[in-house]
Each structure stands twice: as structure tokens, then as C-alpha cells.
């Protein structure tokens, strides 16, 4: 079938493809060294499952159809060059399948084309329609060639290719037409192949590579900074690691991050999509400084809620780029927003973010019989700065103690030896202070030989569980909600008193998206007698951030709307009477937001720990 | 330009107690070593002067043992070039402190000497002034911002004169300025922090005896208003009036009257006041 001239053309297209890809890859390979292991199973599962992309069902399925509708026929065409001998029924089945797939692809492409042309520019990214037109051309010419062939054969309706047969009714039985269509089809394929590295279709390669080298850590995990280098964080594009740059290359600006980013929803200057896109632009002129394209306001609007990472269909992570830039602005330039300087100074002097001092750390537990470590201690209760110092969250800490005592758990607190876990410093970009505090904490926990830790705050939990291991602290860490759910399941506590109310749940980002803990919250909610569980419209993976994470607790909320008000409105509209959450920041922010709304009877915000405690009373 | 910033290390004062608050703390953990925040602002001012001129050297001068090493290193990381420690015998009063500091400054030589307006723990606010006296240099206190006039050998200092009043004072260099809170202290950059770790500590050891202080702070105390006897109000009066009487009775009345008008009428007013109160009764016109 292939003439030698065709083979030559094909070879030329492949050479252009290879050269284009080589040139393109040099762009992201200039990044810093980083050890990554690829995983083929991840890639295969990604392609076969298409779970991420189908989160938007309509556009997602169109995309999946086009992907398989181009790849499978191409594979069949490639294999058929070797004239394999197939039994008749099998080849008929393949032909039928390809025919139907082609028709579906045609519809999907038409849908995409219409969407491309009609979509408002400001809502979506600026995109070219040329690759779509070429794809459309390939499918249409394929069908026309098939139709012409069937028309020449004159078989009438064909079971193997019903759609092709439809085309054959309107086409003349002209061999010339068929030849032309086959030529056009072939050239369009070659054109597509050769142009792949130069159009946005290179996301085929970039996306696949990015999935292959996907971060196997949880989202929102930060790259450990080597504190030896000259420039901490990212000053230029080349300061990112190659994987981080590949990440940016894989982005096709689909806008799913933006749709879920709380900062973007609250009309703040940040859009994760724009950040990644400006990185892509910068990579072509790699010498310029990042601060020229990504402003301080953008960087400090991020709450590190991980929604962008969670919703990216190609596993790109705008979050860690933003964090690298924060690191440079704070550690490289000393440009921390002035309101957050107090928090950093407090961390340095008093080792807690509230600036109360180590001596006050156990005040919440005064005369409450909170055990300190002894021989029989099984579990360390990690109270955290909020539990120890924040007047509202101290109640939660006391409630937790009550529950643990009721369940007969042999627990202890570190008391005055506990320091801040370091999360605020790290999320504010002060990596060196984080490392200092974290190492001291690890040393102290180890010196007492604790192995199991129950953390009250999701931020502490995330730091202890996911970030301390790289500093040498390997502990079994569970969050209070997980622990309570276990206690309830094992009947270690009896929930006697009912809470007759509609309880809505707010998923803390660092628990949900950060560590995939959604179910324990719901289990606890269901176990409370009398309580009716409600889901807020944005829940689980789509959960809306309260606006307090990522160091935002210590920053002013200047531009845009306030995130906690947006969430509070949602809570009020859901008709909940109690809002259950599991994070001190969420608690503070949402309580604040609900009071600010000044509705008649604002829902009461409670930590799930408090809800359980009120039920065992 | 050579700038010397005097920095005091102290223990944080938020939980001091007892008869000797400088040594007694509520809890052992409350003994938090730190750098006097006023001095940090002074350092910030020195660094801004250096940056506005584009050249210069900022030296941190500290007296006594290094108790807050990480904090002093952090101050170095803010951008100071040298760290000098004076080792001298214990038992310091402002006069002796100023003596040692002035001696070190004289030996090192400086165009601008900055220090905090006062320290967080003693709050005497004397060292700067004594130092200026020792060095024979002009002194401006409670400076909140500083403008350099390169080439003229002068600076313009804006100082807080109390009750919301600001003064701008032109001052020739070299000079001693004591700095009040106001400037935002910077966060050290990472590379500067790394550099600060390796900055050597230059020691100067003085052991000579110093003439006894001409002024000595005997005690520091915060005065309380004198208690006033609360009289028993007349029980026959209305409640409102009784309460008003009580309120009037417990208030410390201290009111003067302002004289207005031309100079002549004001002089007349003073004279009549003096006569009325018997101060000038015996003088005949």
C-alpha cells in the first residue's frame, strides 16, 4: 500500500517530529536536577481510566473520544501495513468498531470545534483551532475515502462499516475521488505528526511524560529545599526543577484549576492557570526574572488549598511553583508582607505563631488532669499552637482530652516541649525557620520515644505526617478525626446524647485534598445520634477553602472578596444549623464569616471533636 | 560612611516578677533572650542610611556577654558588616555603659552613632545622651526618620517631641542619635543569614576603673496616683446627685487657667494672680 515515496514522506514527518520534540525538551530540561522515577502502570491506568478528565463529563468524554478515535485507527493502520492475517469475523468486528468510533470522534470534534469558536475569550484561554480542523479533516477524508471505495464496490449497505456506507450513497463511484481522499488523509496525518511539537497538541507528549513522572506524594507536598544553594526558591525559570518545568509544559490552559481556585473565585488577582501560562512564556526567554511576570499579590493570594493540583487533568502542580516563588521572595529578597513579619518573629522568639511563649503552652490544660508522658503512654496528643493558645480552639483541645479519657486511651501531651510544627513558616516561604523548628521537634518526640501521634490540627497533621519524614522523623501520625472515627467504630466511646440538628460538613483542605481523609468526618457525623448530615454544594475534592491556609491566617485579605464570606453564604443557604469541621483555621475563619453575614440565626460552627464530646458528656 | 549601632541584649520583659524583675521570671521558659527592639529599629535606620548613600559600613557594637547569639546573628544578617563586643566588668549603670561604649567608638571612629531610644527592660534612656557627652558630639533623641545630605556633612533628623509633635533637626556629623520605634524592621535574606553565621566576633576587653557616676539611678518605679479619701455622700440627696458627688470627690482636680489677650493684660493677670495668692503681696508699686 505504501509506496517508497510515501515512506520517504513519512520518514521526513517523523524527523521533523523528533527534531521539534528535541528542541522543545531542551526548554524544560534546563531546570534543576531532580530524581524522579517513572511508572508505566500509572500512565496506563491514566489512559484507560481517564478519571481526571471525565470530571467534566461532557468536555471530558469528547476529549477521550478524540484521543482514542485518533490513536486506535492510527495503530490499526500501522499494523495493517504488515498485512497480518486475521479471521474474517475479527477483521469485520475491527472494521465495525473503527467505523463507529470514527463517527463518534467526528461528533466529538465537531462539538469541540463549536466550543472553541463560541467560547468567550475572557473565560477561556486563547487557543488555535488549526489542530482541531486538521483532525476533523483526517476523519472526514477517511470517511470520504471509505465511502468512495464502497461506492466503487457497489455493495450497498455494509455491516462492517455502516457510517462509511452512508457516505457511499451520496458519493460517485469515482476511483479518482477515492485516490484523492486517501492522499489528503495521508498528508493530513503527516502534517499533524510533523506539527505536533509546535502546536498545543504537544500536550500529548508533555502530558504523558508528566503523568509518567507523576508525583507519587500527596498533592501540596513541597520540594525540600537544599539550604546550601545560593538562591533559595525560584528567581528565574531555570531555578525550577525539570519536572516542575515539564509540569508547566503539560498545561493546555484548560482552566479547571481556575474554576476551583478559591482565590480566583473570590476575584483575587491569582489564577493558577495564568501563573503556569506565564511560566510557559518565560521558558522561551528563560533569562528574565519571574517577578516581572508573576506579581506579589498573585503569589500571596494563594491559600495552598491544593484545588488546582487536585483538578488538573495532567497532574500539573501550580501550587509548588507558587511556593517556590514565595520562597525566593521571602528568603531571597526578604519581601515578606509586613503583617506576617510578626508571626515569623513570634516563631523565632517564642516558637509559636501566637506569640504567647512556651511557658503558656499548657495553660489550656491547667487543672484538667491532662496526663504528661509516662511509661504506659501509647499515644501522643499533638495539640498545636491553635489548640494551646487560640481561646476558641482551646475548647476543642479540652474536648479532645475529655473524649480520650472517656475512651480510656493512655495518652499524653508533650506540654512545654512542644513547639510549633513549622507549617506557617514553611507556607509563608521561610524554609530555614521551618527546618530549624522541625528538627528540634523531631528530636524531642524521638527523645521521649513516642511512635503514634494524634494531631488535633490538619496542618500539624500534614506537616508531621508528610513533611517530617524527609527530615528524619518517621512517626505514625493520625488526625483526630480519623482517631475518633476509629474509636467510635470500635465502640470505645458511647455516643449517648443526641444533637438534633442539621449538620453540614466543611472539609479542611489539608485533611481532604491533602491527605484524602473525607470518610472519617462523615462517619463521625453519622454516628452522632439525632444529627442529620448535610453535604455542602462544594464538598470533598471540590471543597471550598476557608481562606486561612498557606499562611493566609497571618496576612491581610486586601484585594477581592473574602473567601470565608463566600463559604459562609453557602453554609447559610444549605440550611444547616451546625457546621462541623476539623481544623482550627476553618473554625476561626468560618465563625468569623458567619458572624459577618449577620443573618438571623447563624449556624453554629463546631469542631467535630466538640460535637463528639457534647455527645458523650 | 562609618555607622556604629549600639545593640543591647536583654531578656524579654513580658513575664517578669518579684522584687528583682530583671532576674526573676514567672517560669524558667520566660527568660527569652532577645535584642532590644529599639536597637533593632536603630540598626534598620543605619542600614537605610548606608543603602541611600550606596556605600558605608555598619558595625554592631554590643556590651557585655553575648546572651542572645541567634538574635544578634539575625541582626547581622539584616545587613550589618561587623560585630564588636565589649567585655567589661559587671555591675553596669548607664554612666559606665556610656563610658565603655564611647571608648570603643572613639577607638573605632565613626560618622554616625545610632542607638535605641531606651531599652525594653531598664527604660532609662540615658546611655545615648551620656555617650554623646563623652564623645563631645551632638545628640538628637527619639529620631523616627533620617535624611542624609551627602557632601554637606549634615543630616536632617525627624524626632518625636511628645504629644504628637514632630521636630526636624539639622545636625552636623558625626553625631549620636537615639532612635524611636517607627521604621519597619526588615527580614534578613537567606544568603545574608548564611553570611552572618561566619562573621567573626571582634572583642574589646576593657578593665579600667571609671570615675564614679555623676548621676545614678537609685530606683525605677512607676508612680501611682495618691489615693484620695472618698467621702460619704449626703443620704438625703437624690441618687443621681450622690453618684455625681462621689465621682467628683474621687477625681483628682488639677486645672490651671489660660491667660488670653494682649501682653499687657496677660502681665496684669499674672500680677493679680500672684497678689491673690500672697506671693507678691509685699511689693509696693
Image (tube, coloured by chain):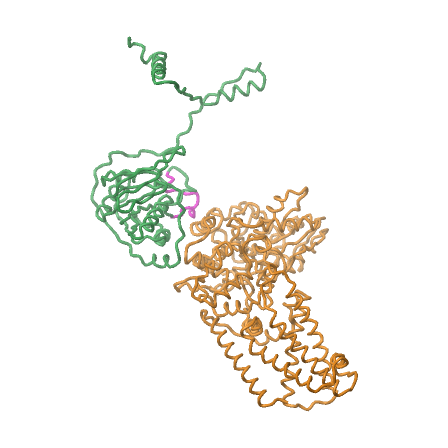
Chain colours: A orange, B green
Where does residue B254 sit, x and y in percent of width and height? Answer: 42, 22
Where does residue A29 sit, x and y in percent of width and height? Answer: 47, 72
Name the quadrant containing residue A69. Answer: bottom right
Residue A200 or A394: which is nearer the viewer? A200
Residue A31 or A554: which is nearer the viewer? A31
In the rendered view, tell whether residue A522 sits above or below residue B151: below
Where does residue A407 sit, x and y in percent of width and height? Answer: 63, 55
Residue A574 or A420: which is nearer the viewer? A574
In the rendered view, tell whether residue A412 sits above or below residue B249: below
Highlighted magenta segment, given as a residue range: B20-33
| Residue A373 visible within the image | no
Q: Mostly what secondary structure, the magenta segment? A: loop
Q: Please tell me how many numbered marks the rendered image carries.
A: 0
Rendered residue at 54%/64% (across/down): A317
Residue B96 inside the magenta-drawn segment: no
The N terminus of chain A lies in quadrant:
bottom right
Name the quadrant containing residue A303. Answer: bottom right
Residue A155 or B255: which is nearer the viewer? A155
- Residue A242 horizontal side relative to residue A150, left or right: left
| Residue A467 visible within the image | yes
Looking at this view, name the residue that lies furthest to the top: B284
- Residue B238 horizontal side relative to residue A436, left or right: right
Name the quadrant containing residue A44. Answer: bottom right
Where does residue B58 sit, x and y in percent of width and height? Answer: 30, 51
Amino acid at each position: 500500500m505504501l509506496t517508497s515515496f510515501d515512506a520517504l514522506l513519512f520518514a521526513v514527518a517523523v524527523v521533523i517530529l523528533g527534531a521539534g520534540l528535541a528542541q522543545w525538551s531542551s526548554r524544560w530540561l534546563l531546570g534543576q536536577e531532580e530524581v524522579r522515577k517513572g511508572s508505566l502502570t500509572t500512565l496506563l491506568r491514566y489512559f484507560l481510566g481517564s478519571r481526571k478528565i471525565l470530571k467534566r463529563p461532557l468536555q471530558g468524554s469528547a476529549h477521550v473520544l478524540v484521543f482514542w478515535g485518533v490513536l486506535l485507527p492510527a495503530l490499526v493502520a500501522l499494523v495493517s501495513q504488515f498485512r497480518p492475517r486475521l479471521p474474517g469475523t475479527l477483521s469485520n468486528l475491527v472494521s465495525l468498531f473503527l467505523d463507529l468510533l470514527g463517527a463518534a470522534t467526528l461528533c466529538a470534534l465537531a462539538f469541540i470545534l463549536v466550543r472553541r469558536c463560541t467560547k468567550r475569550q475572557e473565560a477561556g484561554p486563547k487557543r488555535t483551532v488549526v489542530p482541531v480542523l486538521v483532525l476533523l479533516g483526517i476523519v472526514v477524508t477517511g470517511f470520504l475515502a471509505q465511502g468512495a471505495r464502497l461506492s466503487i464496490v457497489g455493495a450497498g449497505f455494509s455491516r462492517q462499516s455502516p457510517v462509511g456506507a452512508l457516505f457511499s450513497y451520496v458519493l460517485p463511484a469515482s476511483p479518482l475521488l477515492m485516490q484523492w481522499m486517501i492522499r489528503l488523509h495521508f498528508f493530513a496525518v503527516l502534517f499533524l505528526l510533523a506539527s505536533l511539537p509546535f502546536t498545543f497538541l504537544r500536550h500529548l507528549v508533555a502530558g504523558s511524560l508528566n503523568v509518567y513522572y507523576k508525583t507519587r506524594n500527596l498533592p501540596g507536598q513541597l520540594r525540600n529545599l537544599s539550604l546550601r544553594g545560593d538562591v533559595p526558591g525560584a528567581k528565574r525559570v531555570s531555578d525550577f526543577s525539570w519536572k516542575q518545568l515539564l509540569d508547566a509544559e503539560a498545561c493546555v490552559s484548560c482552566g479547571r484549576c481556575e474554576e476551583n481556585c478559591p482565590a480566583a473565585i473570590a476575584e483575587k488577582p491569582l489564577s493558577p492557570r495564568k501563573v503556569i501560562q506565564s511560566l510557559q512564556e518565560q521558558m522561551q526567554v528563560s533569562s528574565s526574572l519571574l517577578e516581572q511576570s508573576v506579581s506579589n499579590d498573585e503569589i500571596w493570594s494563594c491559600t495552598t488549598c491544593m484545588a488546582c493540583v487536585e483538578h488538573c487533568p495532567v497532574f500539573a502542580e501550580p501550587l509548588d511553583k507558587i511556593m517556590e516563588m514565595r520562597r525566593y521572595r521571602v528568603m531571597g529578597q526578604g519581601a515578606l508582607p509586613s503583617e506576617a513579619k510578626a508571626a515569623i518573629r513570634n516563631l523565632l522568639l517564642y516558637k509559636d505563631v501566637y506569640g504567647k511563649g512556651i511557658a503558656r503552652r499548657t495553660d489550656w490544660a491547667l487543672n484538667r488532669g491532662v496526663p504528661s508522658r509516662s511509661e504506659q503512654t501509647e499515644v501522643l496528643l499533638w495539640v498545636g499552637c491553635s489548640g494551646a493558645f487560640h481561646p476558641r480552639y482551646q475548647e476543642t483541645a479540652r474536648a479532645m482530652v475529655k473524649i480520650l479519657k472517656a475512651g480510656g486511651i493512655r495518652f499524653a501531651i508533650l506540654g512545654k516541649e512542644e513547639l510549633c510544627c513549622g507549617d506557617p513558616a514553611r507556607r509563608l516561604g521561610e524554609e530555614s525557620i521551618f527546618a530549624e523548628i522541625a528538627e528540634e521537634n523531631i528530636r524531642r518526640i524521638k527523645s521521649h520515644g513516642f511512635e503514634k501521634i494524634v494531631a488535633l490540627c490538619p496542618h500539624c497533621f500534614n506537616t508531621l505526617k508528610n513533611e517530617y519524614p524527609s527530615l528524619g522523623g518517621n512517626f505514625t501520625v493520625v488526625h483526630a478525626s480519623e482517631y475518633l472515627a476509629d474509636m467510635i467504630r470500635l465502640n470505645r466511646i458511647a455516643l449517648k446524647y443526641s444533637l438534633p440538628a442539621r449538620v453540614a460538613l466543611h472539609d479542611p483542605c489539608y485533611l481532604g485534598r491533602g491527605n484524602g481523609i473525607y470518610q472519617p468526618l462523615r462517619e463521625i457525623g453519622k454516628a452522632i445520634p439525632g444529627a442529620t448530615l448535610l453535604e455542602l454544594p462544594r464538598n470533598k475534592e471540590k471543597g471550598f477553602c476557608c481562606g486561612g491556609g498557606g499562611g493566609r491566617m497571618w496576612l491581610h485579605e486586601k484585594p477581592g472578596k473574602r473567601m470565608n464570606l463566600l463559604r459562609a453564604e453557602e453554609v447559610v443557604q444549605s440550611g444547616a444549623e451546625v457546621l462541623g469541621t476539623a481544623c482550627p483555621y476553618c473554625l476561626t475563619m468560618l465563625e468569623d464569616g458567619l458572624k459577618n453575614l449577620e443573618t438571623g440565626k447563624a449556624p453554629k460552627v463546631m469542631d467535630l471533636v466538640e460535637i463528639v464530646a457534647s455527645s458523650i458528656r | 560612611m562609618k555607622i556604629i549601632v549600639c545593640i543591647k541584649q536583654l531578656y524579654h520583659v513580658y513575664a517578669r516578677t518579684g522584687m528583682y524583675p530583671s532576674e526573676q521570671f514567672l517560669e524558667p521558659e520566660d527568660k527569652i533572650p532577645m535584642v532590644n527592639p529599639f536597637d533593632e529599629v536603630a540598626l534598620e535606620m543605619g542600614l537605610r542610611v548606608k543603602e541611600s548613600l550606596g556605600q558605608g559600613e555598619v558595625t554592631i557594637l554590643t556590651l557585655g556577654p553575648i546572651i542572645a547569639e541567634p538574635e544578634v546573628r539575625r541582626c547581622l544578617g539584616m545587613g550589618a558588616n561587623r560585630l564588636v563586643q565589649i567585655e567589661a566588668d559587671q555591675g553596669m549603670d548607664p554612666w559606665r555603659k556610656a563610658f565603655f561604649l564611647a571608648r570603643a567608638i572613639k577607638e573605632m571612629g565613626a560618622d554616625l552613632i545610632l542607638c535605641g531610644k531606651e531599652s525594653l527592660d531598664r527604660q532609662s534612656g540615658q546611655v545615648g545622651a551620656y555617650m554623646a557627652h563623652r564623645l563631645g558630639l551632638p545628640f538628637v533623641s527619639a529620631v523616627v526618620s533620617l535624611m542624609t545630605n551627602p557632601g554637606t556633612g549634615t543630616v536632617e533628623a525627624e524626632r518625636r517631641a511628645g504629644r504628637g509633635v514632630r521636630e526636624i533637626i539639622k545636625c552636623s556629623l558625626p553625631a549620636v542619635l537615639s532612635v524611636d520605634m517607627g521604621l519597619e524592621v526588615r527580614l534578613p535574606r537567606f544568603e545574608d543569614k548564611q553570611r552572618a553565621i561566619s562573621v567573626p566576633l571582634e572583642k574589646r576587653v576593657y578593665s579600667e576603673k571609671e570615675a564614679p557616676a555623676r548621676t545614678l539611678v537609685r530606683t525605677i518605679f512607676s508612680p501611682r496616683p495618691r489615693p484620695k479619701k472618698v467621702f460619704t455622700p449626703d443620704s438625703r440627696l437624690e441618687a443621681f446627685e450622690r453618684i455625681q458627688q462621689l465621682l467628683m470627690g474621687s477625681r483628682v482636680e488639677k486645672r490651671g487657667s489660660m491667660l488670653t489677650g494682649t501682653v499687657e493684660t496677660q502681665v496684669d493677670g499674672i500680677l493679680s494672680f500672684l497678689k491673690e495668692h500672697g506671693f507678691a503681696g509685699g511689693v509696693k508699686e
